[in-house]
């Protein structure tokens, strides 16, 4: 039985310095090197619809080596750089988008791959941001990139009454800004200013938007925390951690009657409907197409979310657990694996490391019965925990 790997990326662009979420970007040369390698080894890219059909129609599969290429979030470079690269090497891909992050302006920008290869200077704003609906429509109708769903908000919310931190200089709580300035979310990669959200803003225990009920902190609790922050002069991380610990105890004593409230079952259910069903409807209406596949943002989901996705008419959603897809897998699930390592030297991916990494991922697609795959899986899990998950 043939196994099929789904290689997942986010962004393909060269950064000359660290930027917000630039850790999600592999270099143009590294990605092109991977495409060259896949082509040399005889891989053919197929769509998620074709994978679904193979699972459900019991079609005899030929001896071709199949691969699926995915991109999460709808970064602008997926159009200006990835799109012409895929066309050049004869591959196709799927891009998952969240409507909250789609650039609302009626614009179509110029592709940049040729200019980059020719060594021309490329302005950051031509590649770093998110695609517009017009650009998404263009790539989707090309037959090269298929646009699918990534839920609505792709954010984080407070999910419990424990204070875990306060907003401070250099932190990674970007979602505080997203949730405060929703209309600016499509532009946050270039417009984010950590000072727009007041330092000292409380950060209660939090989770990805879909996986748990929201916790709404009472206004008087937030005011108490901000007042205490203004009184206290915090100059380093150690003082901040002690401040948060002390404040937690004070909050529990002062607000014994309640720090806030959780979403009701009905509120949570309706929010998940908006995240899943409404986002699907918006993409379908804006692109005039059927949306049948859903990649959970950050992999976060639960049983209720899975059921709502089924009710919404999704054919398949992502699921963790394997580095490959077997044709005997349940049609409703597809499994994904990273397409690049995330390792950078001097803030740039290394072509040799990326070549070894893609070779490892393709080997993993042979199946868990291979002893070496157990070692690869362990290495991958440790690497992801240390270099990827903790940053998002």
Image (cartoon, helix red, strand yellow):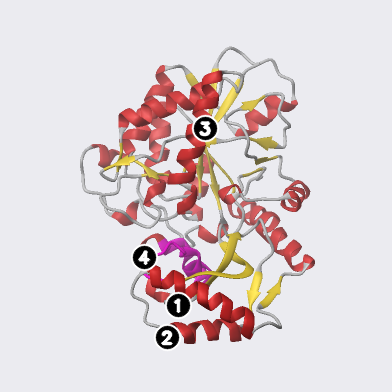
User: Does residue 173 sit above or below 285 in this rendering?
Assistant: below
Instruction: Give yes or no for residue 76 being in the magenta stretch.
Output: no
Q: Earlier in the sequence, mark 3 or mark 2?
A: 2
* Residue ID for mark 1: 200
* Residue ID for mark 4: 170
Q: Nearer the viewer, mark 1 or mark 3?
A: 3
Q: Give SS at disc 2.
A: helix
The answer to the question of whether label 2 and label 1 lie on touching residues, with beta carbons closer than 8 A, is yes
The x and y percentages for residue 260 are 67, 77
The answer to the question of whether label 1 and label 3 lie on touching residues, with beta carbons closer than 8 A, is no
Q: Nearer the viewer, mark 4 or mark 3?
A: 3
> Residue at the location (45% across, 72% down)?
242
- Residue 230, which numbered label? 2
Nearest to the observer: residue 229 or residue 60: 229
Q: Earlier in the sequence, mark 4 or mark 1?
A: 4
Q: Earlier in the sequence, mark 4 or mark 3?
A: 4
The alpha-carbon separation of the residues under discs 1 and 3 comes to 38 Å
């Amino acid at each position: 039985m043939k196994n099929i790997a789904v290689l997942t990326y986010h962004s393909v662009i060269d950064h000359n310095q660290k930027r917000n979420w630039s850790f999600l970007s592999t270099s143009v040369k590294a990605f092109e090197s991977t495409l060259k390698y896949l082509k040399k080894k005889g891989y053919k890219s197929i769509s998620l619809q074709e994978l679904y059909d193979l699972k459900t129609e019991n079609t005899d599969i030929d001896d071709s080596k199949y691969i699926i290429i995915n991109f999460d979030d709808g970064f602008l470079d997926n159009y200006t750089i990835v799109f012409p690269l895929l066309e050049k090497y004869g591959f196709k891909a799927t891009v998952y988008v969240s409507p909250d992050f789609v650039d609302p302006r009626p614009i179509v920008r110029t592709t940049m791959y040729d200019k980059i290869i020719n060594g021309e200077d490329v302005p950051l704003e031509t590649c770093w941001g998110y695609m517009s609906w017009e650009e998404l429509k263009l790539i989707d109708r090309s037959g090269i990139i298929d646009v699918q769903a990534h839920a609505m908000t792709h954010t984080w919310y407070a999910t419990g009454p424990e204070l875990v931190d306060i907003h401070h200089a250099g932190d990674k709580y970007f979602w505080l800004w997203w949730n405060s300035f929703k209309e600016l979310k499509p532009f946050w990669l270039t417009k984010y200013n950590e000072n727009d959200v007041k330092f000292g803003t409380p950060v209660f225990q939090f989770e990805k938007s879909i996986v748990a009920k929201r916790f709404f902190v009472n206004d008087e609790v937030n005011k108490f925390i901000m007042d205490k922050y203004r009184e206290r002069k915090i100059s380093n991380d150690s003082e901040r951690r002690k401040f948060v610990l002390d404040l937690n105890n004070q909050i529990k004593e002062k607000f014994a009657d309640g720090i806030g409230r959780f979403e009701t079952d009905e509120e949570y259910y309706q929010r998940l409907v908006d995240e899943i069903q409404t986002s699907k409807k918006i993409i379908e209406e804006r692109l005039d197409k059927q949306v049948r596949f859903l990649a959970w943002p950050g992999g976060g989901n639960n049983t209720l979310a899975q059921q709502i996705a089924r009710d919404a008419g999704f054919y398949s959603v992502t699921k963790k657990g394997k580095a490959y897809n077997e044709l005997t897998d349940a049609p409703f699930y597809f499994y994904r694996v990273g397409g690049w390592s995330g390792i950078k030297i001097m803030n740039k991916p290394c072509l040799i490391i990326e070549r070894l990494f893609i070779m490892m991922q393709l080997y993993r697609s042979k199946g868990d019965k291979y002893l070496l795959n157990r070692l690869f899986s362990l290495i991958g899990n440790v690497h992801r925990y240390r270099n990827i998950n903790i940053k998002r």
